[in-house]
Image (tube, rainbow, N blue to C red):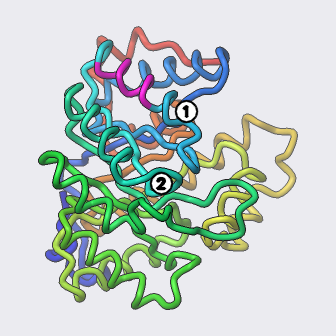
Amino acid sequence: MTSAGAAAPYSTATTTEAPVRVSFEFFPPNDDAMEQTLWASLQRLAPLSPHFVSVTYGADGSTRERTHNVVTRILRETALTPAPHLTCVGAPRGEVLDVARSYWDAGVRHVVALRGDPPAGQAGYVPHPDGFAYAVDLVRGLRSVGDFDISVAAYPETHPEAPSAQFDLDNLRSKVDAGATRAITQFFFDTDLFLRFRDRCAAAGIRAGIVPGILPITRFPHMLKFARRCGTAVPDWLVRRFDGLEDDAETRRMIAASFAIEQVRRLQEHGVQDFHFYTLNRSELTVAICHALGVRAPSNVASRATVEA
């Protein structure tokens, strides 16, 4: 993994031969059809030997049981390394740590520690009176349970609730100092933003991997909603690429794959070795992007793979 502390200014980093490592994010399904899609995607992506696969956790713990079910099934039925999300929202410290202990006892060694989003209908984030206030507190709590490999969130364009970019960077450094192993970024579309952010992390003394979060664009209008909610800028030139394709799914997929491949190849040229993909429980685009990065299933496995509907 590329260490943020070792990252050179992006304008001079041009290494392309470093080995690539990938990870994938999934969300727990809420009906039988979505469950079938999830497991078909996991089976298609598993031969790429991801470093880990993360499973999200709904606001106020609304998907706790479903997240746990997906994680335990991954442990039971696959050779993949699951990384459940844990958040600070809607639960006292003891309850959160009990969940962490249950994961540890089940064999989980990797956790994604997040503050979490406020529940639907709540204007802003309010810490639970008996809970962990922020992700840095959760990281410290997880360290008291076991020697977890802990991923945290990072924001190349600054967290939308942060009072300043410097405050946001200081918060990331605090999470790393508390025991986080790596930071996975919010998705972004301006590659220069990530490269400048990586340089700022290095200058701030953040000695942990800064892993770019990549969102393959499966449905452009939905992506725009996600972007507005999390403060991700969508360049006008990218909007123009998708203009007029509302009823042309095949061309949309081609444009989406082309853009994402451009993005990851440029990051790779600047020394990025680790990539985290927000799959939205689909595999097609992620497989294509990984292929371009040189991350491929063994030929005997790839030949048997079937593309989901």
Frontmost residue, 265 versus 3:
3
- Mark sitting earlier along the chain (1/2): 2
Q: Using the image, tell me which numbered label, if any, was put on residue 31.
A: none
> Is residue 227 visible to us here?
yes
Q: Amino acid at mark 2?
A: Ile
Determine the CA span between mark 1 and mark 2: 14 Å
Q: Position of residue 132 (x, y in %)?
A: 38, 62
* Residue at position x 48%, y 64% in the image: 129
**Is residue 161 within the magenta segment?**
no
Quadrant showing the C terminus: top right
Secondary structure of the residue carrying numbered label 2: strand
- Residue 156 lies, with reference to residue 85, above or below; the image says below
Report whether residue 266 is seen: no
Q: Position of residue 22 (x, y in %)?
A: 31, 44
Magenta segment's dominant SS is: helix
Q: Label 2: which residue? A: 214
Could you say which quadrant of the image residue 154 lies in?
bottom left
- Indicate which disc residue 281 carries: 1
Name the foreground residue: 178 vs 55: 178
Disc 1 + disc 2, Cβ < 8 Å: no
69 is within the stretch colored magenta:
yes
What residue range appears in magenta?
A: 68-75
